[in-house]
């Protein structure tokens, strides 16, 4: 670079603001939060260790039992094997569903993205900043769906922070259902990244990597607009738009709620994690949490349970779940105001209630009725 | 504590965190503010930076100085905040409180009593040019360090820096002409 520096250059060495803005109060707050986080992590590690020990004890008991009755079980197993091999004869092949032929399909004209790097995050090895536009192709129908500009950050962010080591998919089979993310670059080149909604994985040429939970919601919203995840995506997106508007309301810090009034069925986020372990009707999806730099699982709990576990947020969609004041899915706005009180943050779609330092309890409305109730992970 | 010592730290205690915050806290806050132009976001981003460092100090391997490493994390988190808008509240619930501002970003910048007129000029630059100029002029990073922090080539850094300087010089002269 030219060593000549303009006369104003030196002025930029000073502080942009005329007072200290990072104070001892900030430091104190950060230290407390760091300590709390570590305590939660230690708690989780202990819980994991306990579960492993219990599993090991159970496995030991089973092995001991099997050893004791080995001879008897041997004959029983042989008979059972005969039975299940008969029972599980694969059915006669049927004609596969006919695919709509579009030769050559539009997405097949794109350049498949191939990342050779073995480590780092995608943004460091590929010019993600140069992506100009993103769309999705349904590989089954060949249909092209434009991703609205204001939602493209979801894909950009998930791709940018894909860790080429930590996000590697445990199952490298993407399944049958696939779509193609088409990335148009500033120089006109178009790249294709196959995405599997079944596995929530992207194919970067050298292997499959888990995408974020938000990509799954986005794609479901685009491809299966009637699905539960699509519905949720629509409402959360509407709330996001309202909160992000220039004239969005400011959070009212003048009051806060007793945390007990913001529990759902008497449990907070952490307790709900334990409760969910006992729920069986779940469609799990793995995702890569770029903030935590780890793989995690989100879940769609079906049937009467009807709740969705996203990254650090539990969303309740059934009227069976209530706060202690009786607020829940199906409550009307007036009813919520009467039973619970006014929110600290309010837009048409999203009402947030504050307990402690943060807003952790949200109600999402549709046409004046609570559609979802949600609690967030304590940060 | 020397930079080289940090690379041997596997887990950070609150005393070490305090040391880092005292040494680099205001620098981190300033960068977050200059990138986002929002006071509340700068508060949240600074908090996230130090929490991340507290949890991930083992990832610091001394390839850069501690200051450059922190600036890099700050820049990435700030970009994330700006890109993700509301959805970030899912993982960083504090974001929502900072987002509920009723004034425009530019107005808020003015309200922050920026020390020098030159900063108002710099804050008018597009983000891509602004970040390069700030990292070079204020934080005195080398071309190589900036390329690493921004994830772009040194050639692109040079070209962006030249464009940023040209623009600021033009605004600056224009402003002086009216005085």
Image (cartoon, helix red, strand yellow):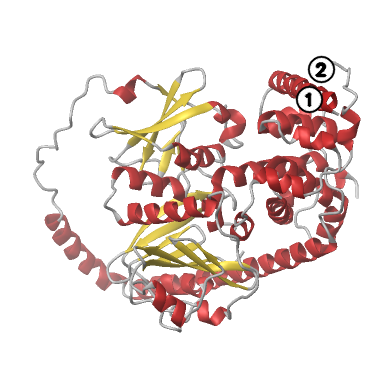
**Front residue of this view, candidates B31 and A105:** B31
Q: Is residue A198 visible?
A: no
**Position of residue B52 measured from the top left corner of the image (x, y, whole percent):** 69, 53
Q: Residue furthest front?
A: B178
Q: Residue A6's quadrant in the figure?
A: top right
- Identify the residue at image location x=86%, y=29%: B179
Q: Residue A61's quadrant in the figure?
A: bottom left
Kindly state the secondary structure of the residue where label 1 is placed: helix
> Is B162 situated left or right of A331 in this image?
right
Chain bearing mark 2: A
In the depicted structure, whether residue B40 falls above or below residue B126: below
- Identify the residue at image location x=34%, y=63%: A367
Q: Are marks 2 and 1 in contact (CB under 8 Å)?
A: yes
Residue hosting label 1: B143
Nearer to us of marks 2 and 1 is: 2
Kindly state the secondary structure of the residue where label 2 is placed: loop
Question: Mark 2: few, some, or many residues within 10 Å (few <14, many ≥20)?
Answer: few
Q: Is residue A82 visible?
A: yes
**Front residue of this view, candidates A229 and B99:** B99
**Position of residue B3 measured from the top left corner of the image (x, y, whole percent):** 86, 44
> Is A115 situated left or right of B124 in this image?
left
Residue hosting label 2: A1
Q: Are marks 2 and 1 on the same chain?
A: no
> Is B127 situated left or right of A257 in this image?
right
Chain bearing mark 1: B
**Front residue of this view, candidates A3 and A338:** A338
- Identify the residue at image location x=17%, y=32%: A99
In the depicted structure, whether residue A84 falls above or below residue A272: above
**Position of residue A192 measured from the top left corner of the image (x, y, whole percent):** 41, 27
Q: CA distance from mark 2 to mark 1?
A: 8 Å
**Position of residue A219 measured from the top left corner of the image (x, y, whole percent):** 37, 44
């Amino acid at each position: 670079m030219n060593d000549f520096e303009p006369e104003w250059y030196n002025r930029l060495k000073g502080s942009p603001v005329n007072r200290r803005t990072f104070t001892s109060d900030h430091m104190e707050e950060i230290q407390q939060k760091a300590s709390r986080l570590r305590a939660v992590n230690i708690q989780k590690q202990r819980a994991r260790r306990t579960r492993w020990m219990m599993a090991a004890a159970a496995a030991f008991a089973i092995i001991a039992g099997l050893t004791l009755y080995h001879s008897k079980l041997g004959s029983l197993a042989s008979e059972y094997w005969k039975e299940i091999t008969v029972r599980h004869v694969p059915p006669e092949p049927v004609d596969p569903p006919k695919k709509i032929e579009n030769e050559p399909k539009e997405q097949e004209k794109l350049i498949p993205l191939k990342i050779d790097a073995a480590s780092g995050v995608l943004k460091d090895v590929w010019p993600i900043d140069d992506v100009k536009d993103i769309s999705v192709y349904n590989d089954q129908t060949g249909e092209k769906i434009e991703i609205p500009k204001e939602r493209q950050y979801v894909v950009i962010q998930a791709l940018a922070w894909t860790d080429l080591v930590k996000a590697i998919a445990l199952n490298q089979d993407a399944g049958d259902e696939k779509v193609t993310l088409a990335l148009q670059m500033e120089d006109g080149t178009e790249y294709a990244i196959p995405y599997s909604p079944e596995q929530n994985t992207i194919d970067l040429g050298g292997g499959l990597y888990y995408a974020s939970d938000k990509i799954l919601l986005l794609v479901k919203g685009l491809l299966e607009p009637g699905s539960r995840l699509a519905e949720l995506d629509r409402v959360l997106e509407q709330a996001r738009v309202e909160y992000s508007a220039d004239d969005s309301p400011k959070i009212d810090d003048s009051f806060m709620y007793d945390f007990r009034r913001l529990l759902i069925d008497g449990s907070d986020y952490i307790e709900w994690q334990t409760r969910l372990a006992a729920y069986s009707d779940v469609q799990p999806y793995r995702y890569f949490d770029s903030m935590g730099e780890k793989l995690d699982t989100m879940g769609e709990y079906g049937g009467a349970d009807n709740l969705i576990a996203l990254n650090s947020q539990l969303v309740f969609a059934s009227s069976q779940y209530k706060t202690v004041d009786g607020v829940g899915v199906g409550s009307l706005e007036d009813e919520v105001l009467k039973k619970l009180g006014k929110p600290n943050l309010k837009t048409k779609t999203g009402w947030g209630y504050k307990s402690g330092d943060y807003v952790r309890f949200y109600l999402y409305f549709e046409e004046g009725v609570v559609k979802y109730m949600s609690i967030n992970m304590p940060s | 504590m020397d930079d080289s010592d940090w690379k041997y730290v596997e887990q950070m205690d609150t005393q070490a965190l305090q040391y880092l915050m005292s040494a680099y806290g205001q620098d981190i806050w300033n960068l977050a503010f200059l990138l986002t132009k929002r006071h509340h976001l700068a508060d949240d981003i600074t908090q996230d930076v130090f929490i991340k460092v507290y949890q991930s100090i083992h990832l610091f391997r001394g390839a850069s100085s501690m200051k450059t490493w922190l600036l890099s994390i700050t820049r990435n988190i700030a970009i994330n905040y700006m890109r993700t808008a509301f959805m970030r509240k899912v993982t960083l619930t504090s974001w929502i409180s900072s987002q509920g501002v009723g004034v425009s970003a530019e107005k808020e910048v003015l309200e922050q009593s920026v020390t020098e007129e030159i900063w108002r000029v710099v804050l008018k630059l597009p983000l891509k040019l602004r970040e390069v100029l700030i990292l070079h002029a204020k934080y005195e990073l080398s071309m190589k360090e900036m390329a690493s922090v921004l994830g772009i080539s040194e050639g692109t850094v040079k070209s962006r820096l030249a464009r940023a300087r040209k623009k600021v010089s033009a605004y600056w002269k224009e402003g002086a002409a009216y005085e």
